[in-house]
Image (cartoon, grey):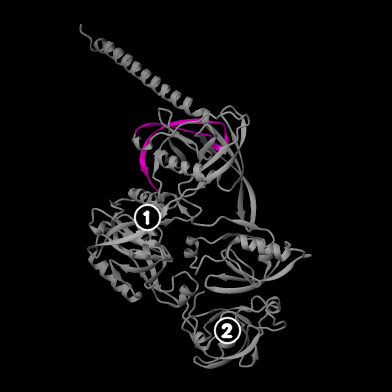
Amino acid sequence: MFSTKAAIKPVLVIFLTVFSIIGAAAADEIKRETTTAVEAVRPALIRILIVAADYRQGREMKAESAGSGVIVSPEGYAVTNHHVAMDAERIVCTLADKREVEATLVGTDPLADIAVIKLQSPDKKPFPFASFGDSSKLGVGDRVFAMGCPLALSQSVTMGIVSNTEMIMPGFFGGNDFQLEGEDVGSIVRWIGHDALIRPGNSGGPLVDRDGKIVGINEISYGLSGAIPSNLAKEVAGQLIKTGKVTRSWLGLEVQPLLESSGLERGVLIGGVMDDSPAKKSGFKSGDVLLSLDGKNVTAKFKEEVPLFNQFVADIPIGKTVKAIVLRDGKEITLNVTTVERQRAIGRQDELKNWGICASDITYMMSKEMQLDSQEGTVVTGVLPSGPAGSAKPSIREEDVIVGVGNEKISNVDQLRSLTRKILEGADGIVPVIVNFNRGKKQYATVVKIGKKESSKSGVEARKAWLPIDMQVLTDDLAQALGVTGKTGVRVTQVYPASSAEKAGLKVGDLILKLDDEVIPADQPGDEEVLPSMVRQYDIGAQVKLGIVRDGQPMEIMVDLETSPKLPRDYPKYEDENFEFSARDIAFADKTEGSVISDNSGVYVESVTEGSWAALGNLQPGDVIAEINGKKLSGLAELELAMKRIAEEKPKRVVFKVLRGIHALFVEIEPGWQAF
């Protein structure tokens, strides 16, 4: 009798045998590839132990960290991440043969997160090294090997496949969430996404292809691992080895992908144009669509294309004048712009022990971010609370800008350090010095005793009479330093533009000692409200006599009192139920405190509900909405009308032009109206 089971059994045996042979062959192939990759790169793999400066609360502290790297030349040049080697004061590398050798920092590039170190050969023999491959030839599904020293352990290899060759930060991370020293790494890097396991300590290690070539430098892990493409890493490392730094061209454009609502198929949207930049001087405007640059058509329809555009701009020769064609109001316009060298985003920190502070020079970008008039001065990056600067009255704080010490202006950290040595030369003990510093738009003076570390609801306020200035208390130390020993009162730190105080001739630095011949009893920290309280006893519009001292000379000035400005909390608010954000008109305090640029107009965003359509579109508290769908907003009434019309028409997309500090960008929100 015929048996079905008997017939199937031989076939099944044959199938399993063939499958086993194929599986064994595949396993052998993987083993051969792994062996090839490991043998080619493992001798050049290094573990890097770092002793680096860490700046906290006005002190330079030493901190230990570890990472990975790979030797790329017989002379001992090795590539790692900037975030591994930055601020390194001592570097010790462990080689594959377990030897430990010291290395020096050649240079770092925070924008690409690449650094180069040079190992010191103890026997003068060449080092084993690995070679770079071509990352542009990688494809999704290619097998790769992540090599490094995770958690500062010995060398490891993990295997995976390429998942994405143009990985960027997702929008819900803010789009630029990975920053190093003020630089947005994602602005020029598109990571190679792969699933080979990497952990802390793998940073700087090589991503290797099946031929044993370096195709990436591992950097990040967000569940999926990410490596900097080798073509970019090789270019940056080459510049660092040759000159110790990376030079790039800069135009001052802030770009983003084309908006869906634009209907355009080519070009790059100009979100913002930096002040005093080549682009600004050449006539670029926010909202322009750049079609071509230096004879090359440019397009960024997707966020993944923006890093390629930024790389293209960076590679234009510095000082070259190039032609740009932009689309503005439906017309093509030709502009000529000359590139300049791109500067560091933030200055390097330095500790000034005699002051109890850490400080840095002011870069172009810092001056714009902090809304400073120039790059002159030294910005305080940290303060030791019990130190000389932290103990002064008023104390110096983080982000204050020191502009003068005694009678000398301060331009940078080196000058402050040199002047400090001069002041303390031959001094016995502490030396009190008068320091002028800026805090936002206010100009302060204080006395710092350097040379020795010391131990250390919302109701509406009635509108009343107001003297349109800001001030600091004239403490005993400050009075003595300014030559008015024993006097009490206030020092003017800011005179509001176009105010009665400015018209009367009151100036920053004036010492106000009397109000209508009455002494102002303010001499202690906390007495800031003494003069304002005295002023509030007068009628709005009353004229008062101020007894002042200017440059050591007593004077009298007559000033008309104004109406006190409305507080932010007293402004009516608009709350949008569909997009879930609240806004109000821009308050006087928003501009004087520096959170809003003085000439900005629009409405101030007070809150954005987490998980709302507005939040998903990246609208943020503190933003100023300047336009909605291309129409300018001058105030809250126009916002309410615009949002009412949007709720009625229910468009697929709504575009807000947003001013965020010194930056301008377009926020495109796509509400799901069916949910309302």
161 and 447: which one is in front?
447
Label 1: few (<14), some (14–19) or many (≥20) C-alpha neighbours in 10 Å: few
Which amino acid type is shown beneath numbered disc 2? Pro
Identify the residue at image location x=36%, y=68%.
Answer: 625
x%, y% of residue 43?
52, 28
498 and 148: which one is in front?
498
Q: On the image, numbered disc 1 is attached to which residue? A: 320
Q: Is residue 223 visible?
A: no
For the image, the number of numbered tags is 2
x%, y% of residue 633?
33, 72
Q: CA distance from mark 2 to mark 1?
A: 56 Å
Q: Which quadrant of the structure image shows residue 93?
A: top right
**2 vs 1, front mark:** 1
Judge left or right: residue 505 versus residue 487: left
Compared to residue 8, the image places residue 115 above or below, namely below
Q: Which residues are magenta?
A: 141-168
Residue 596 located within the stretch drawn in magenta: no
Compared to residue 466, the image places residue 662 above or below, namely above
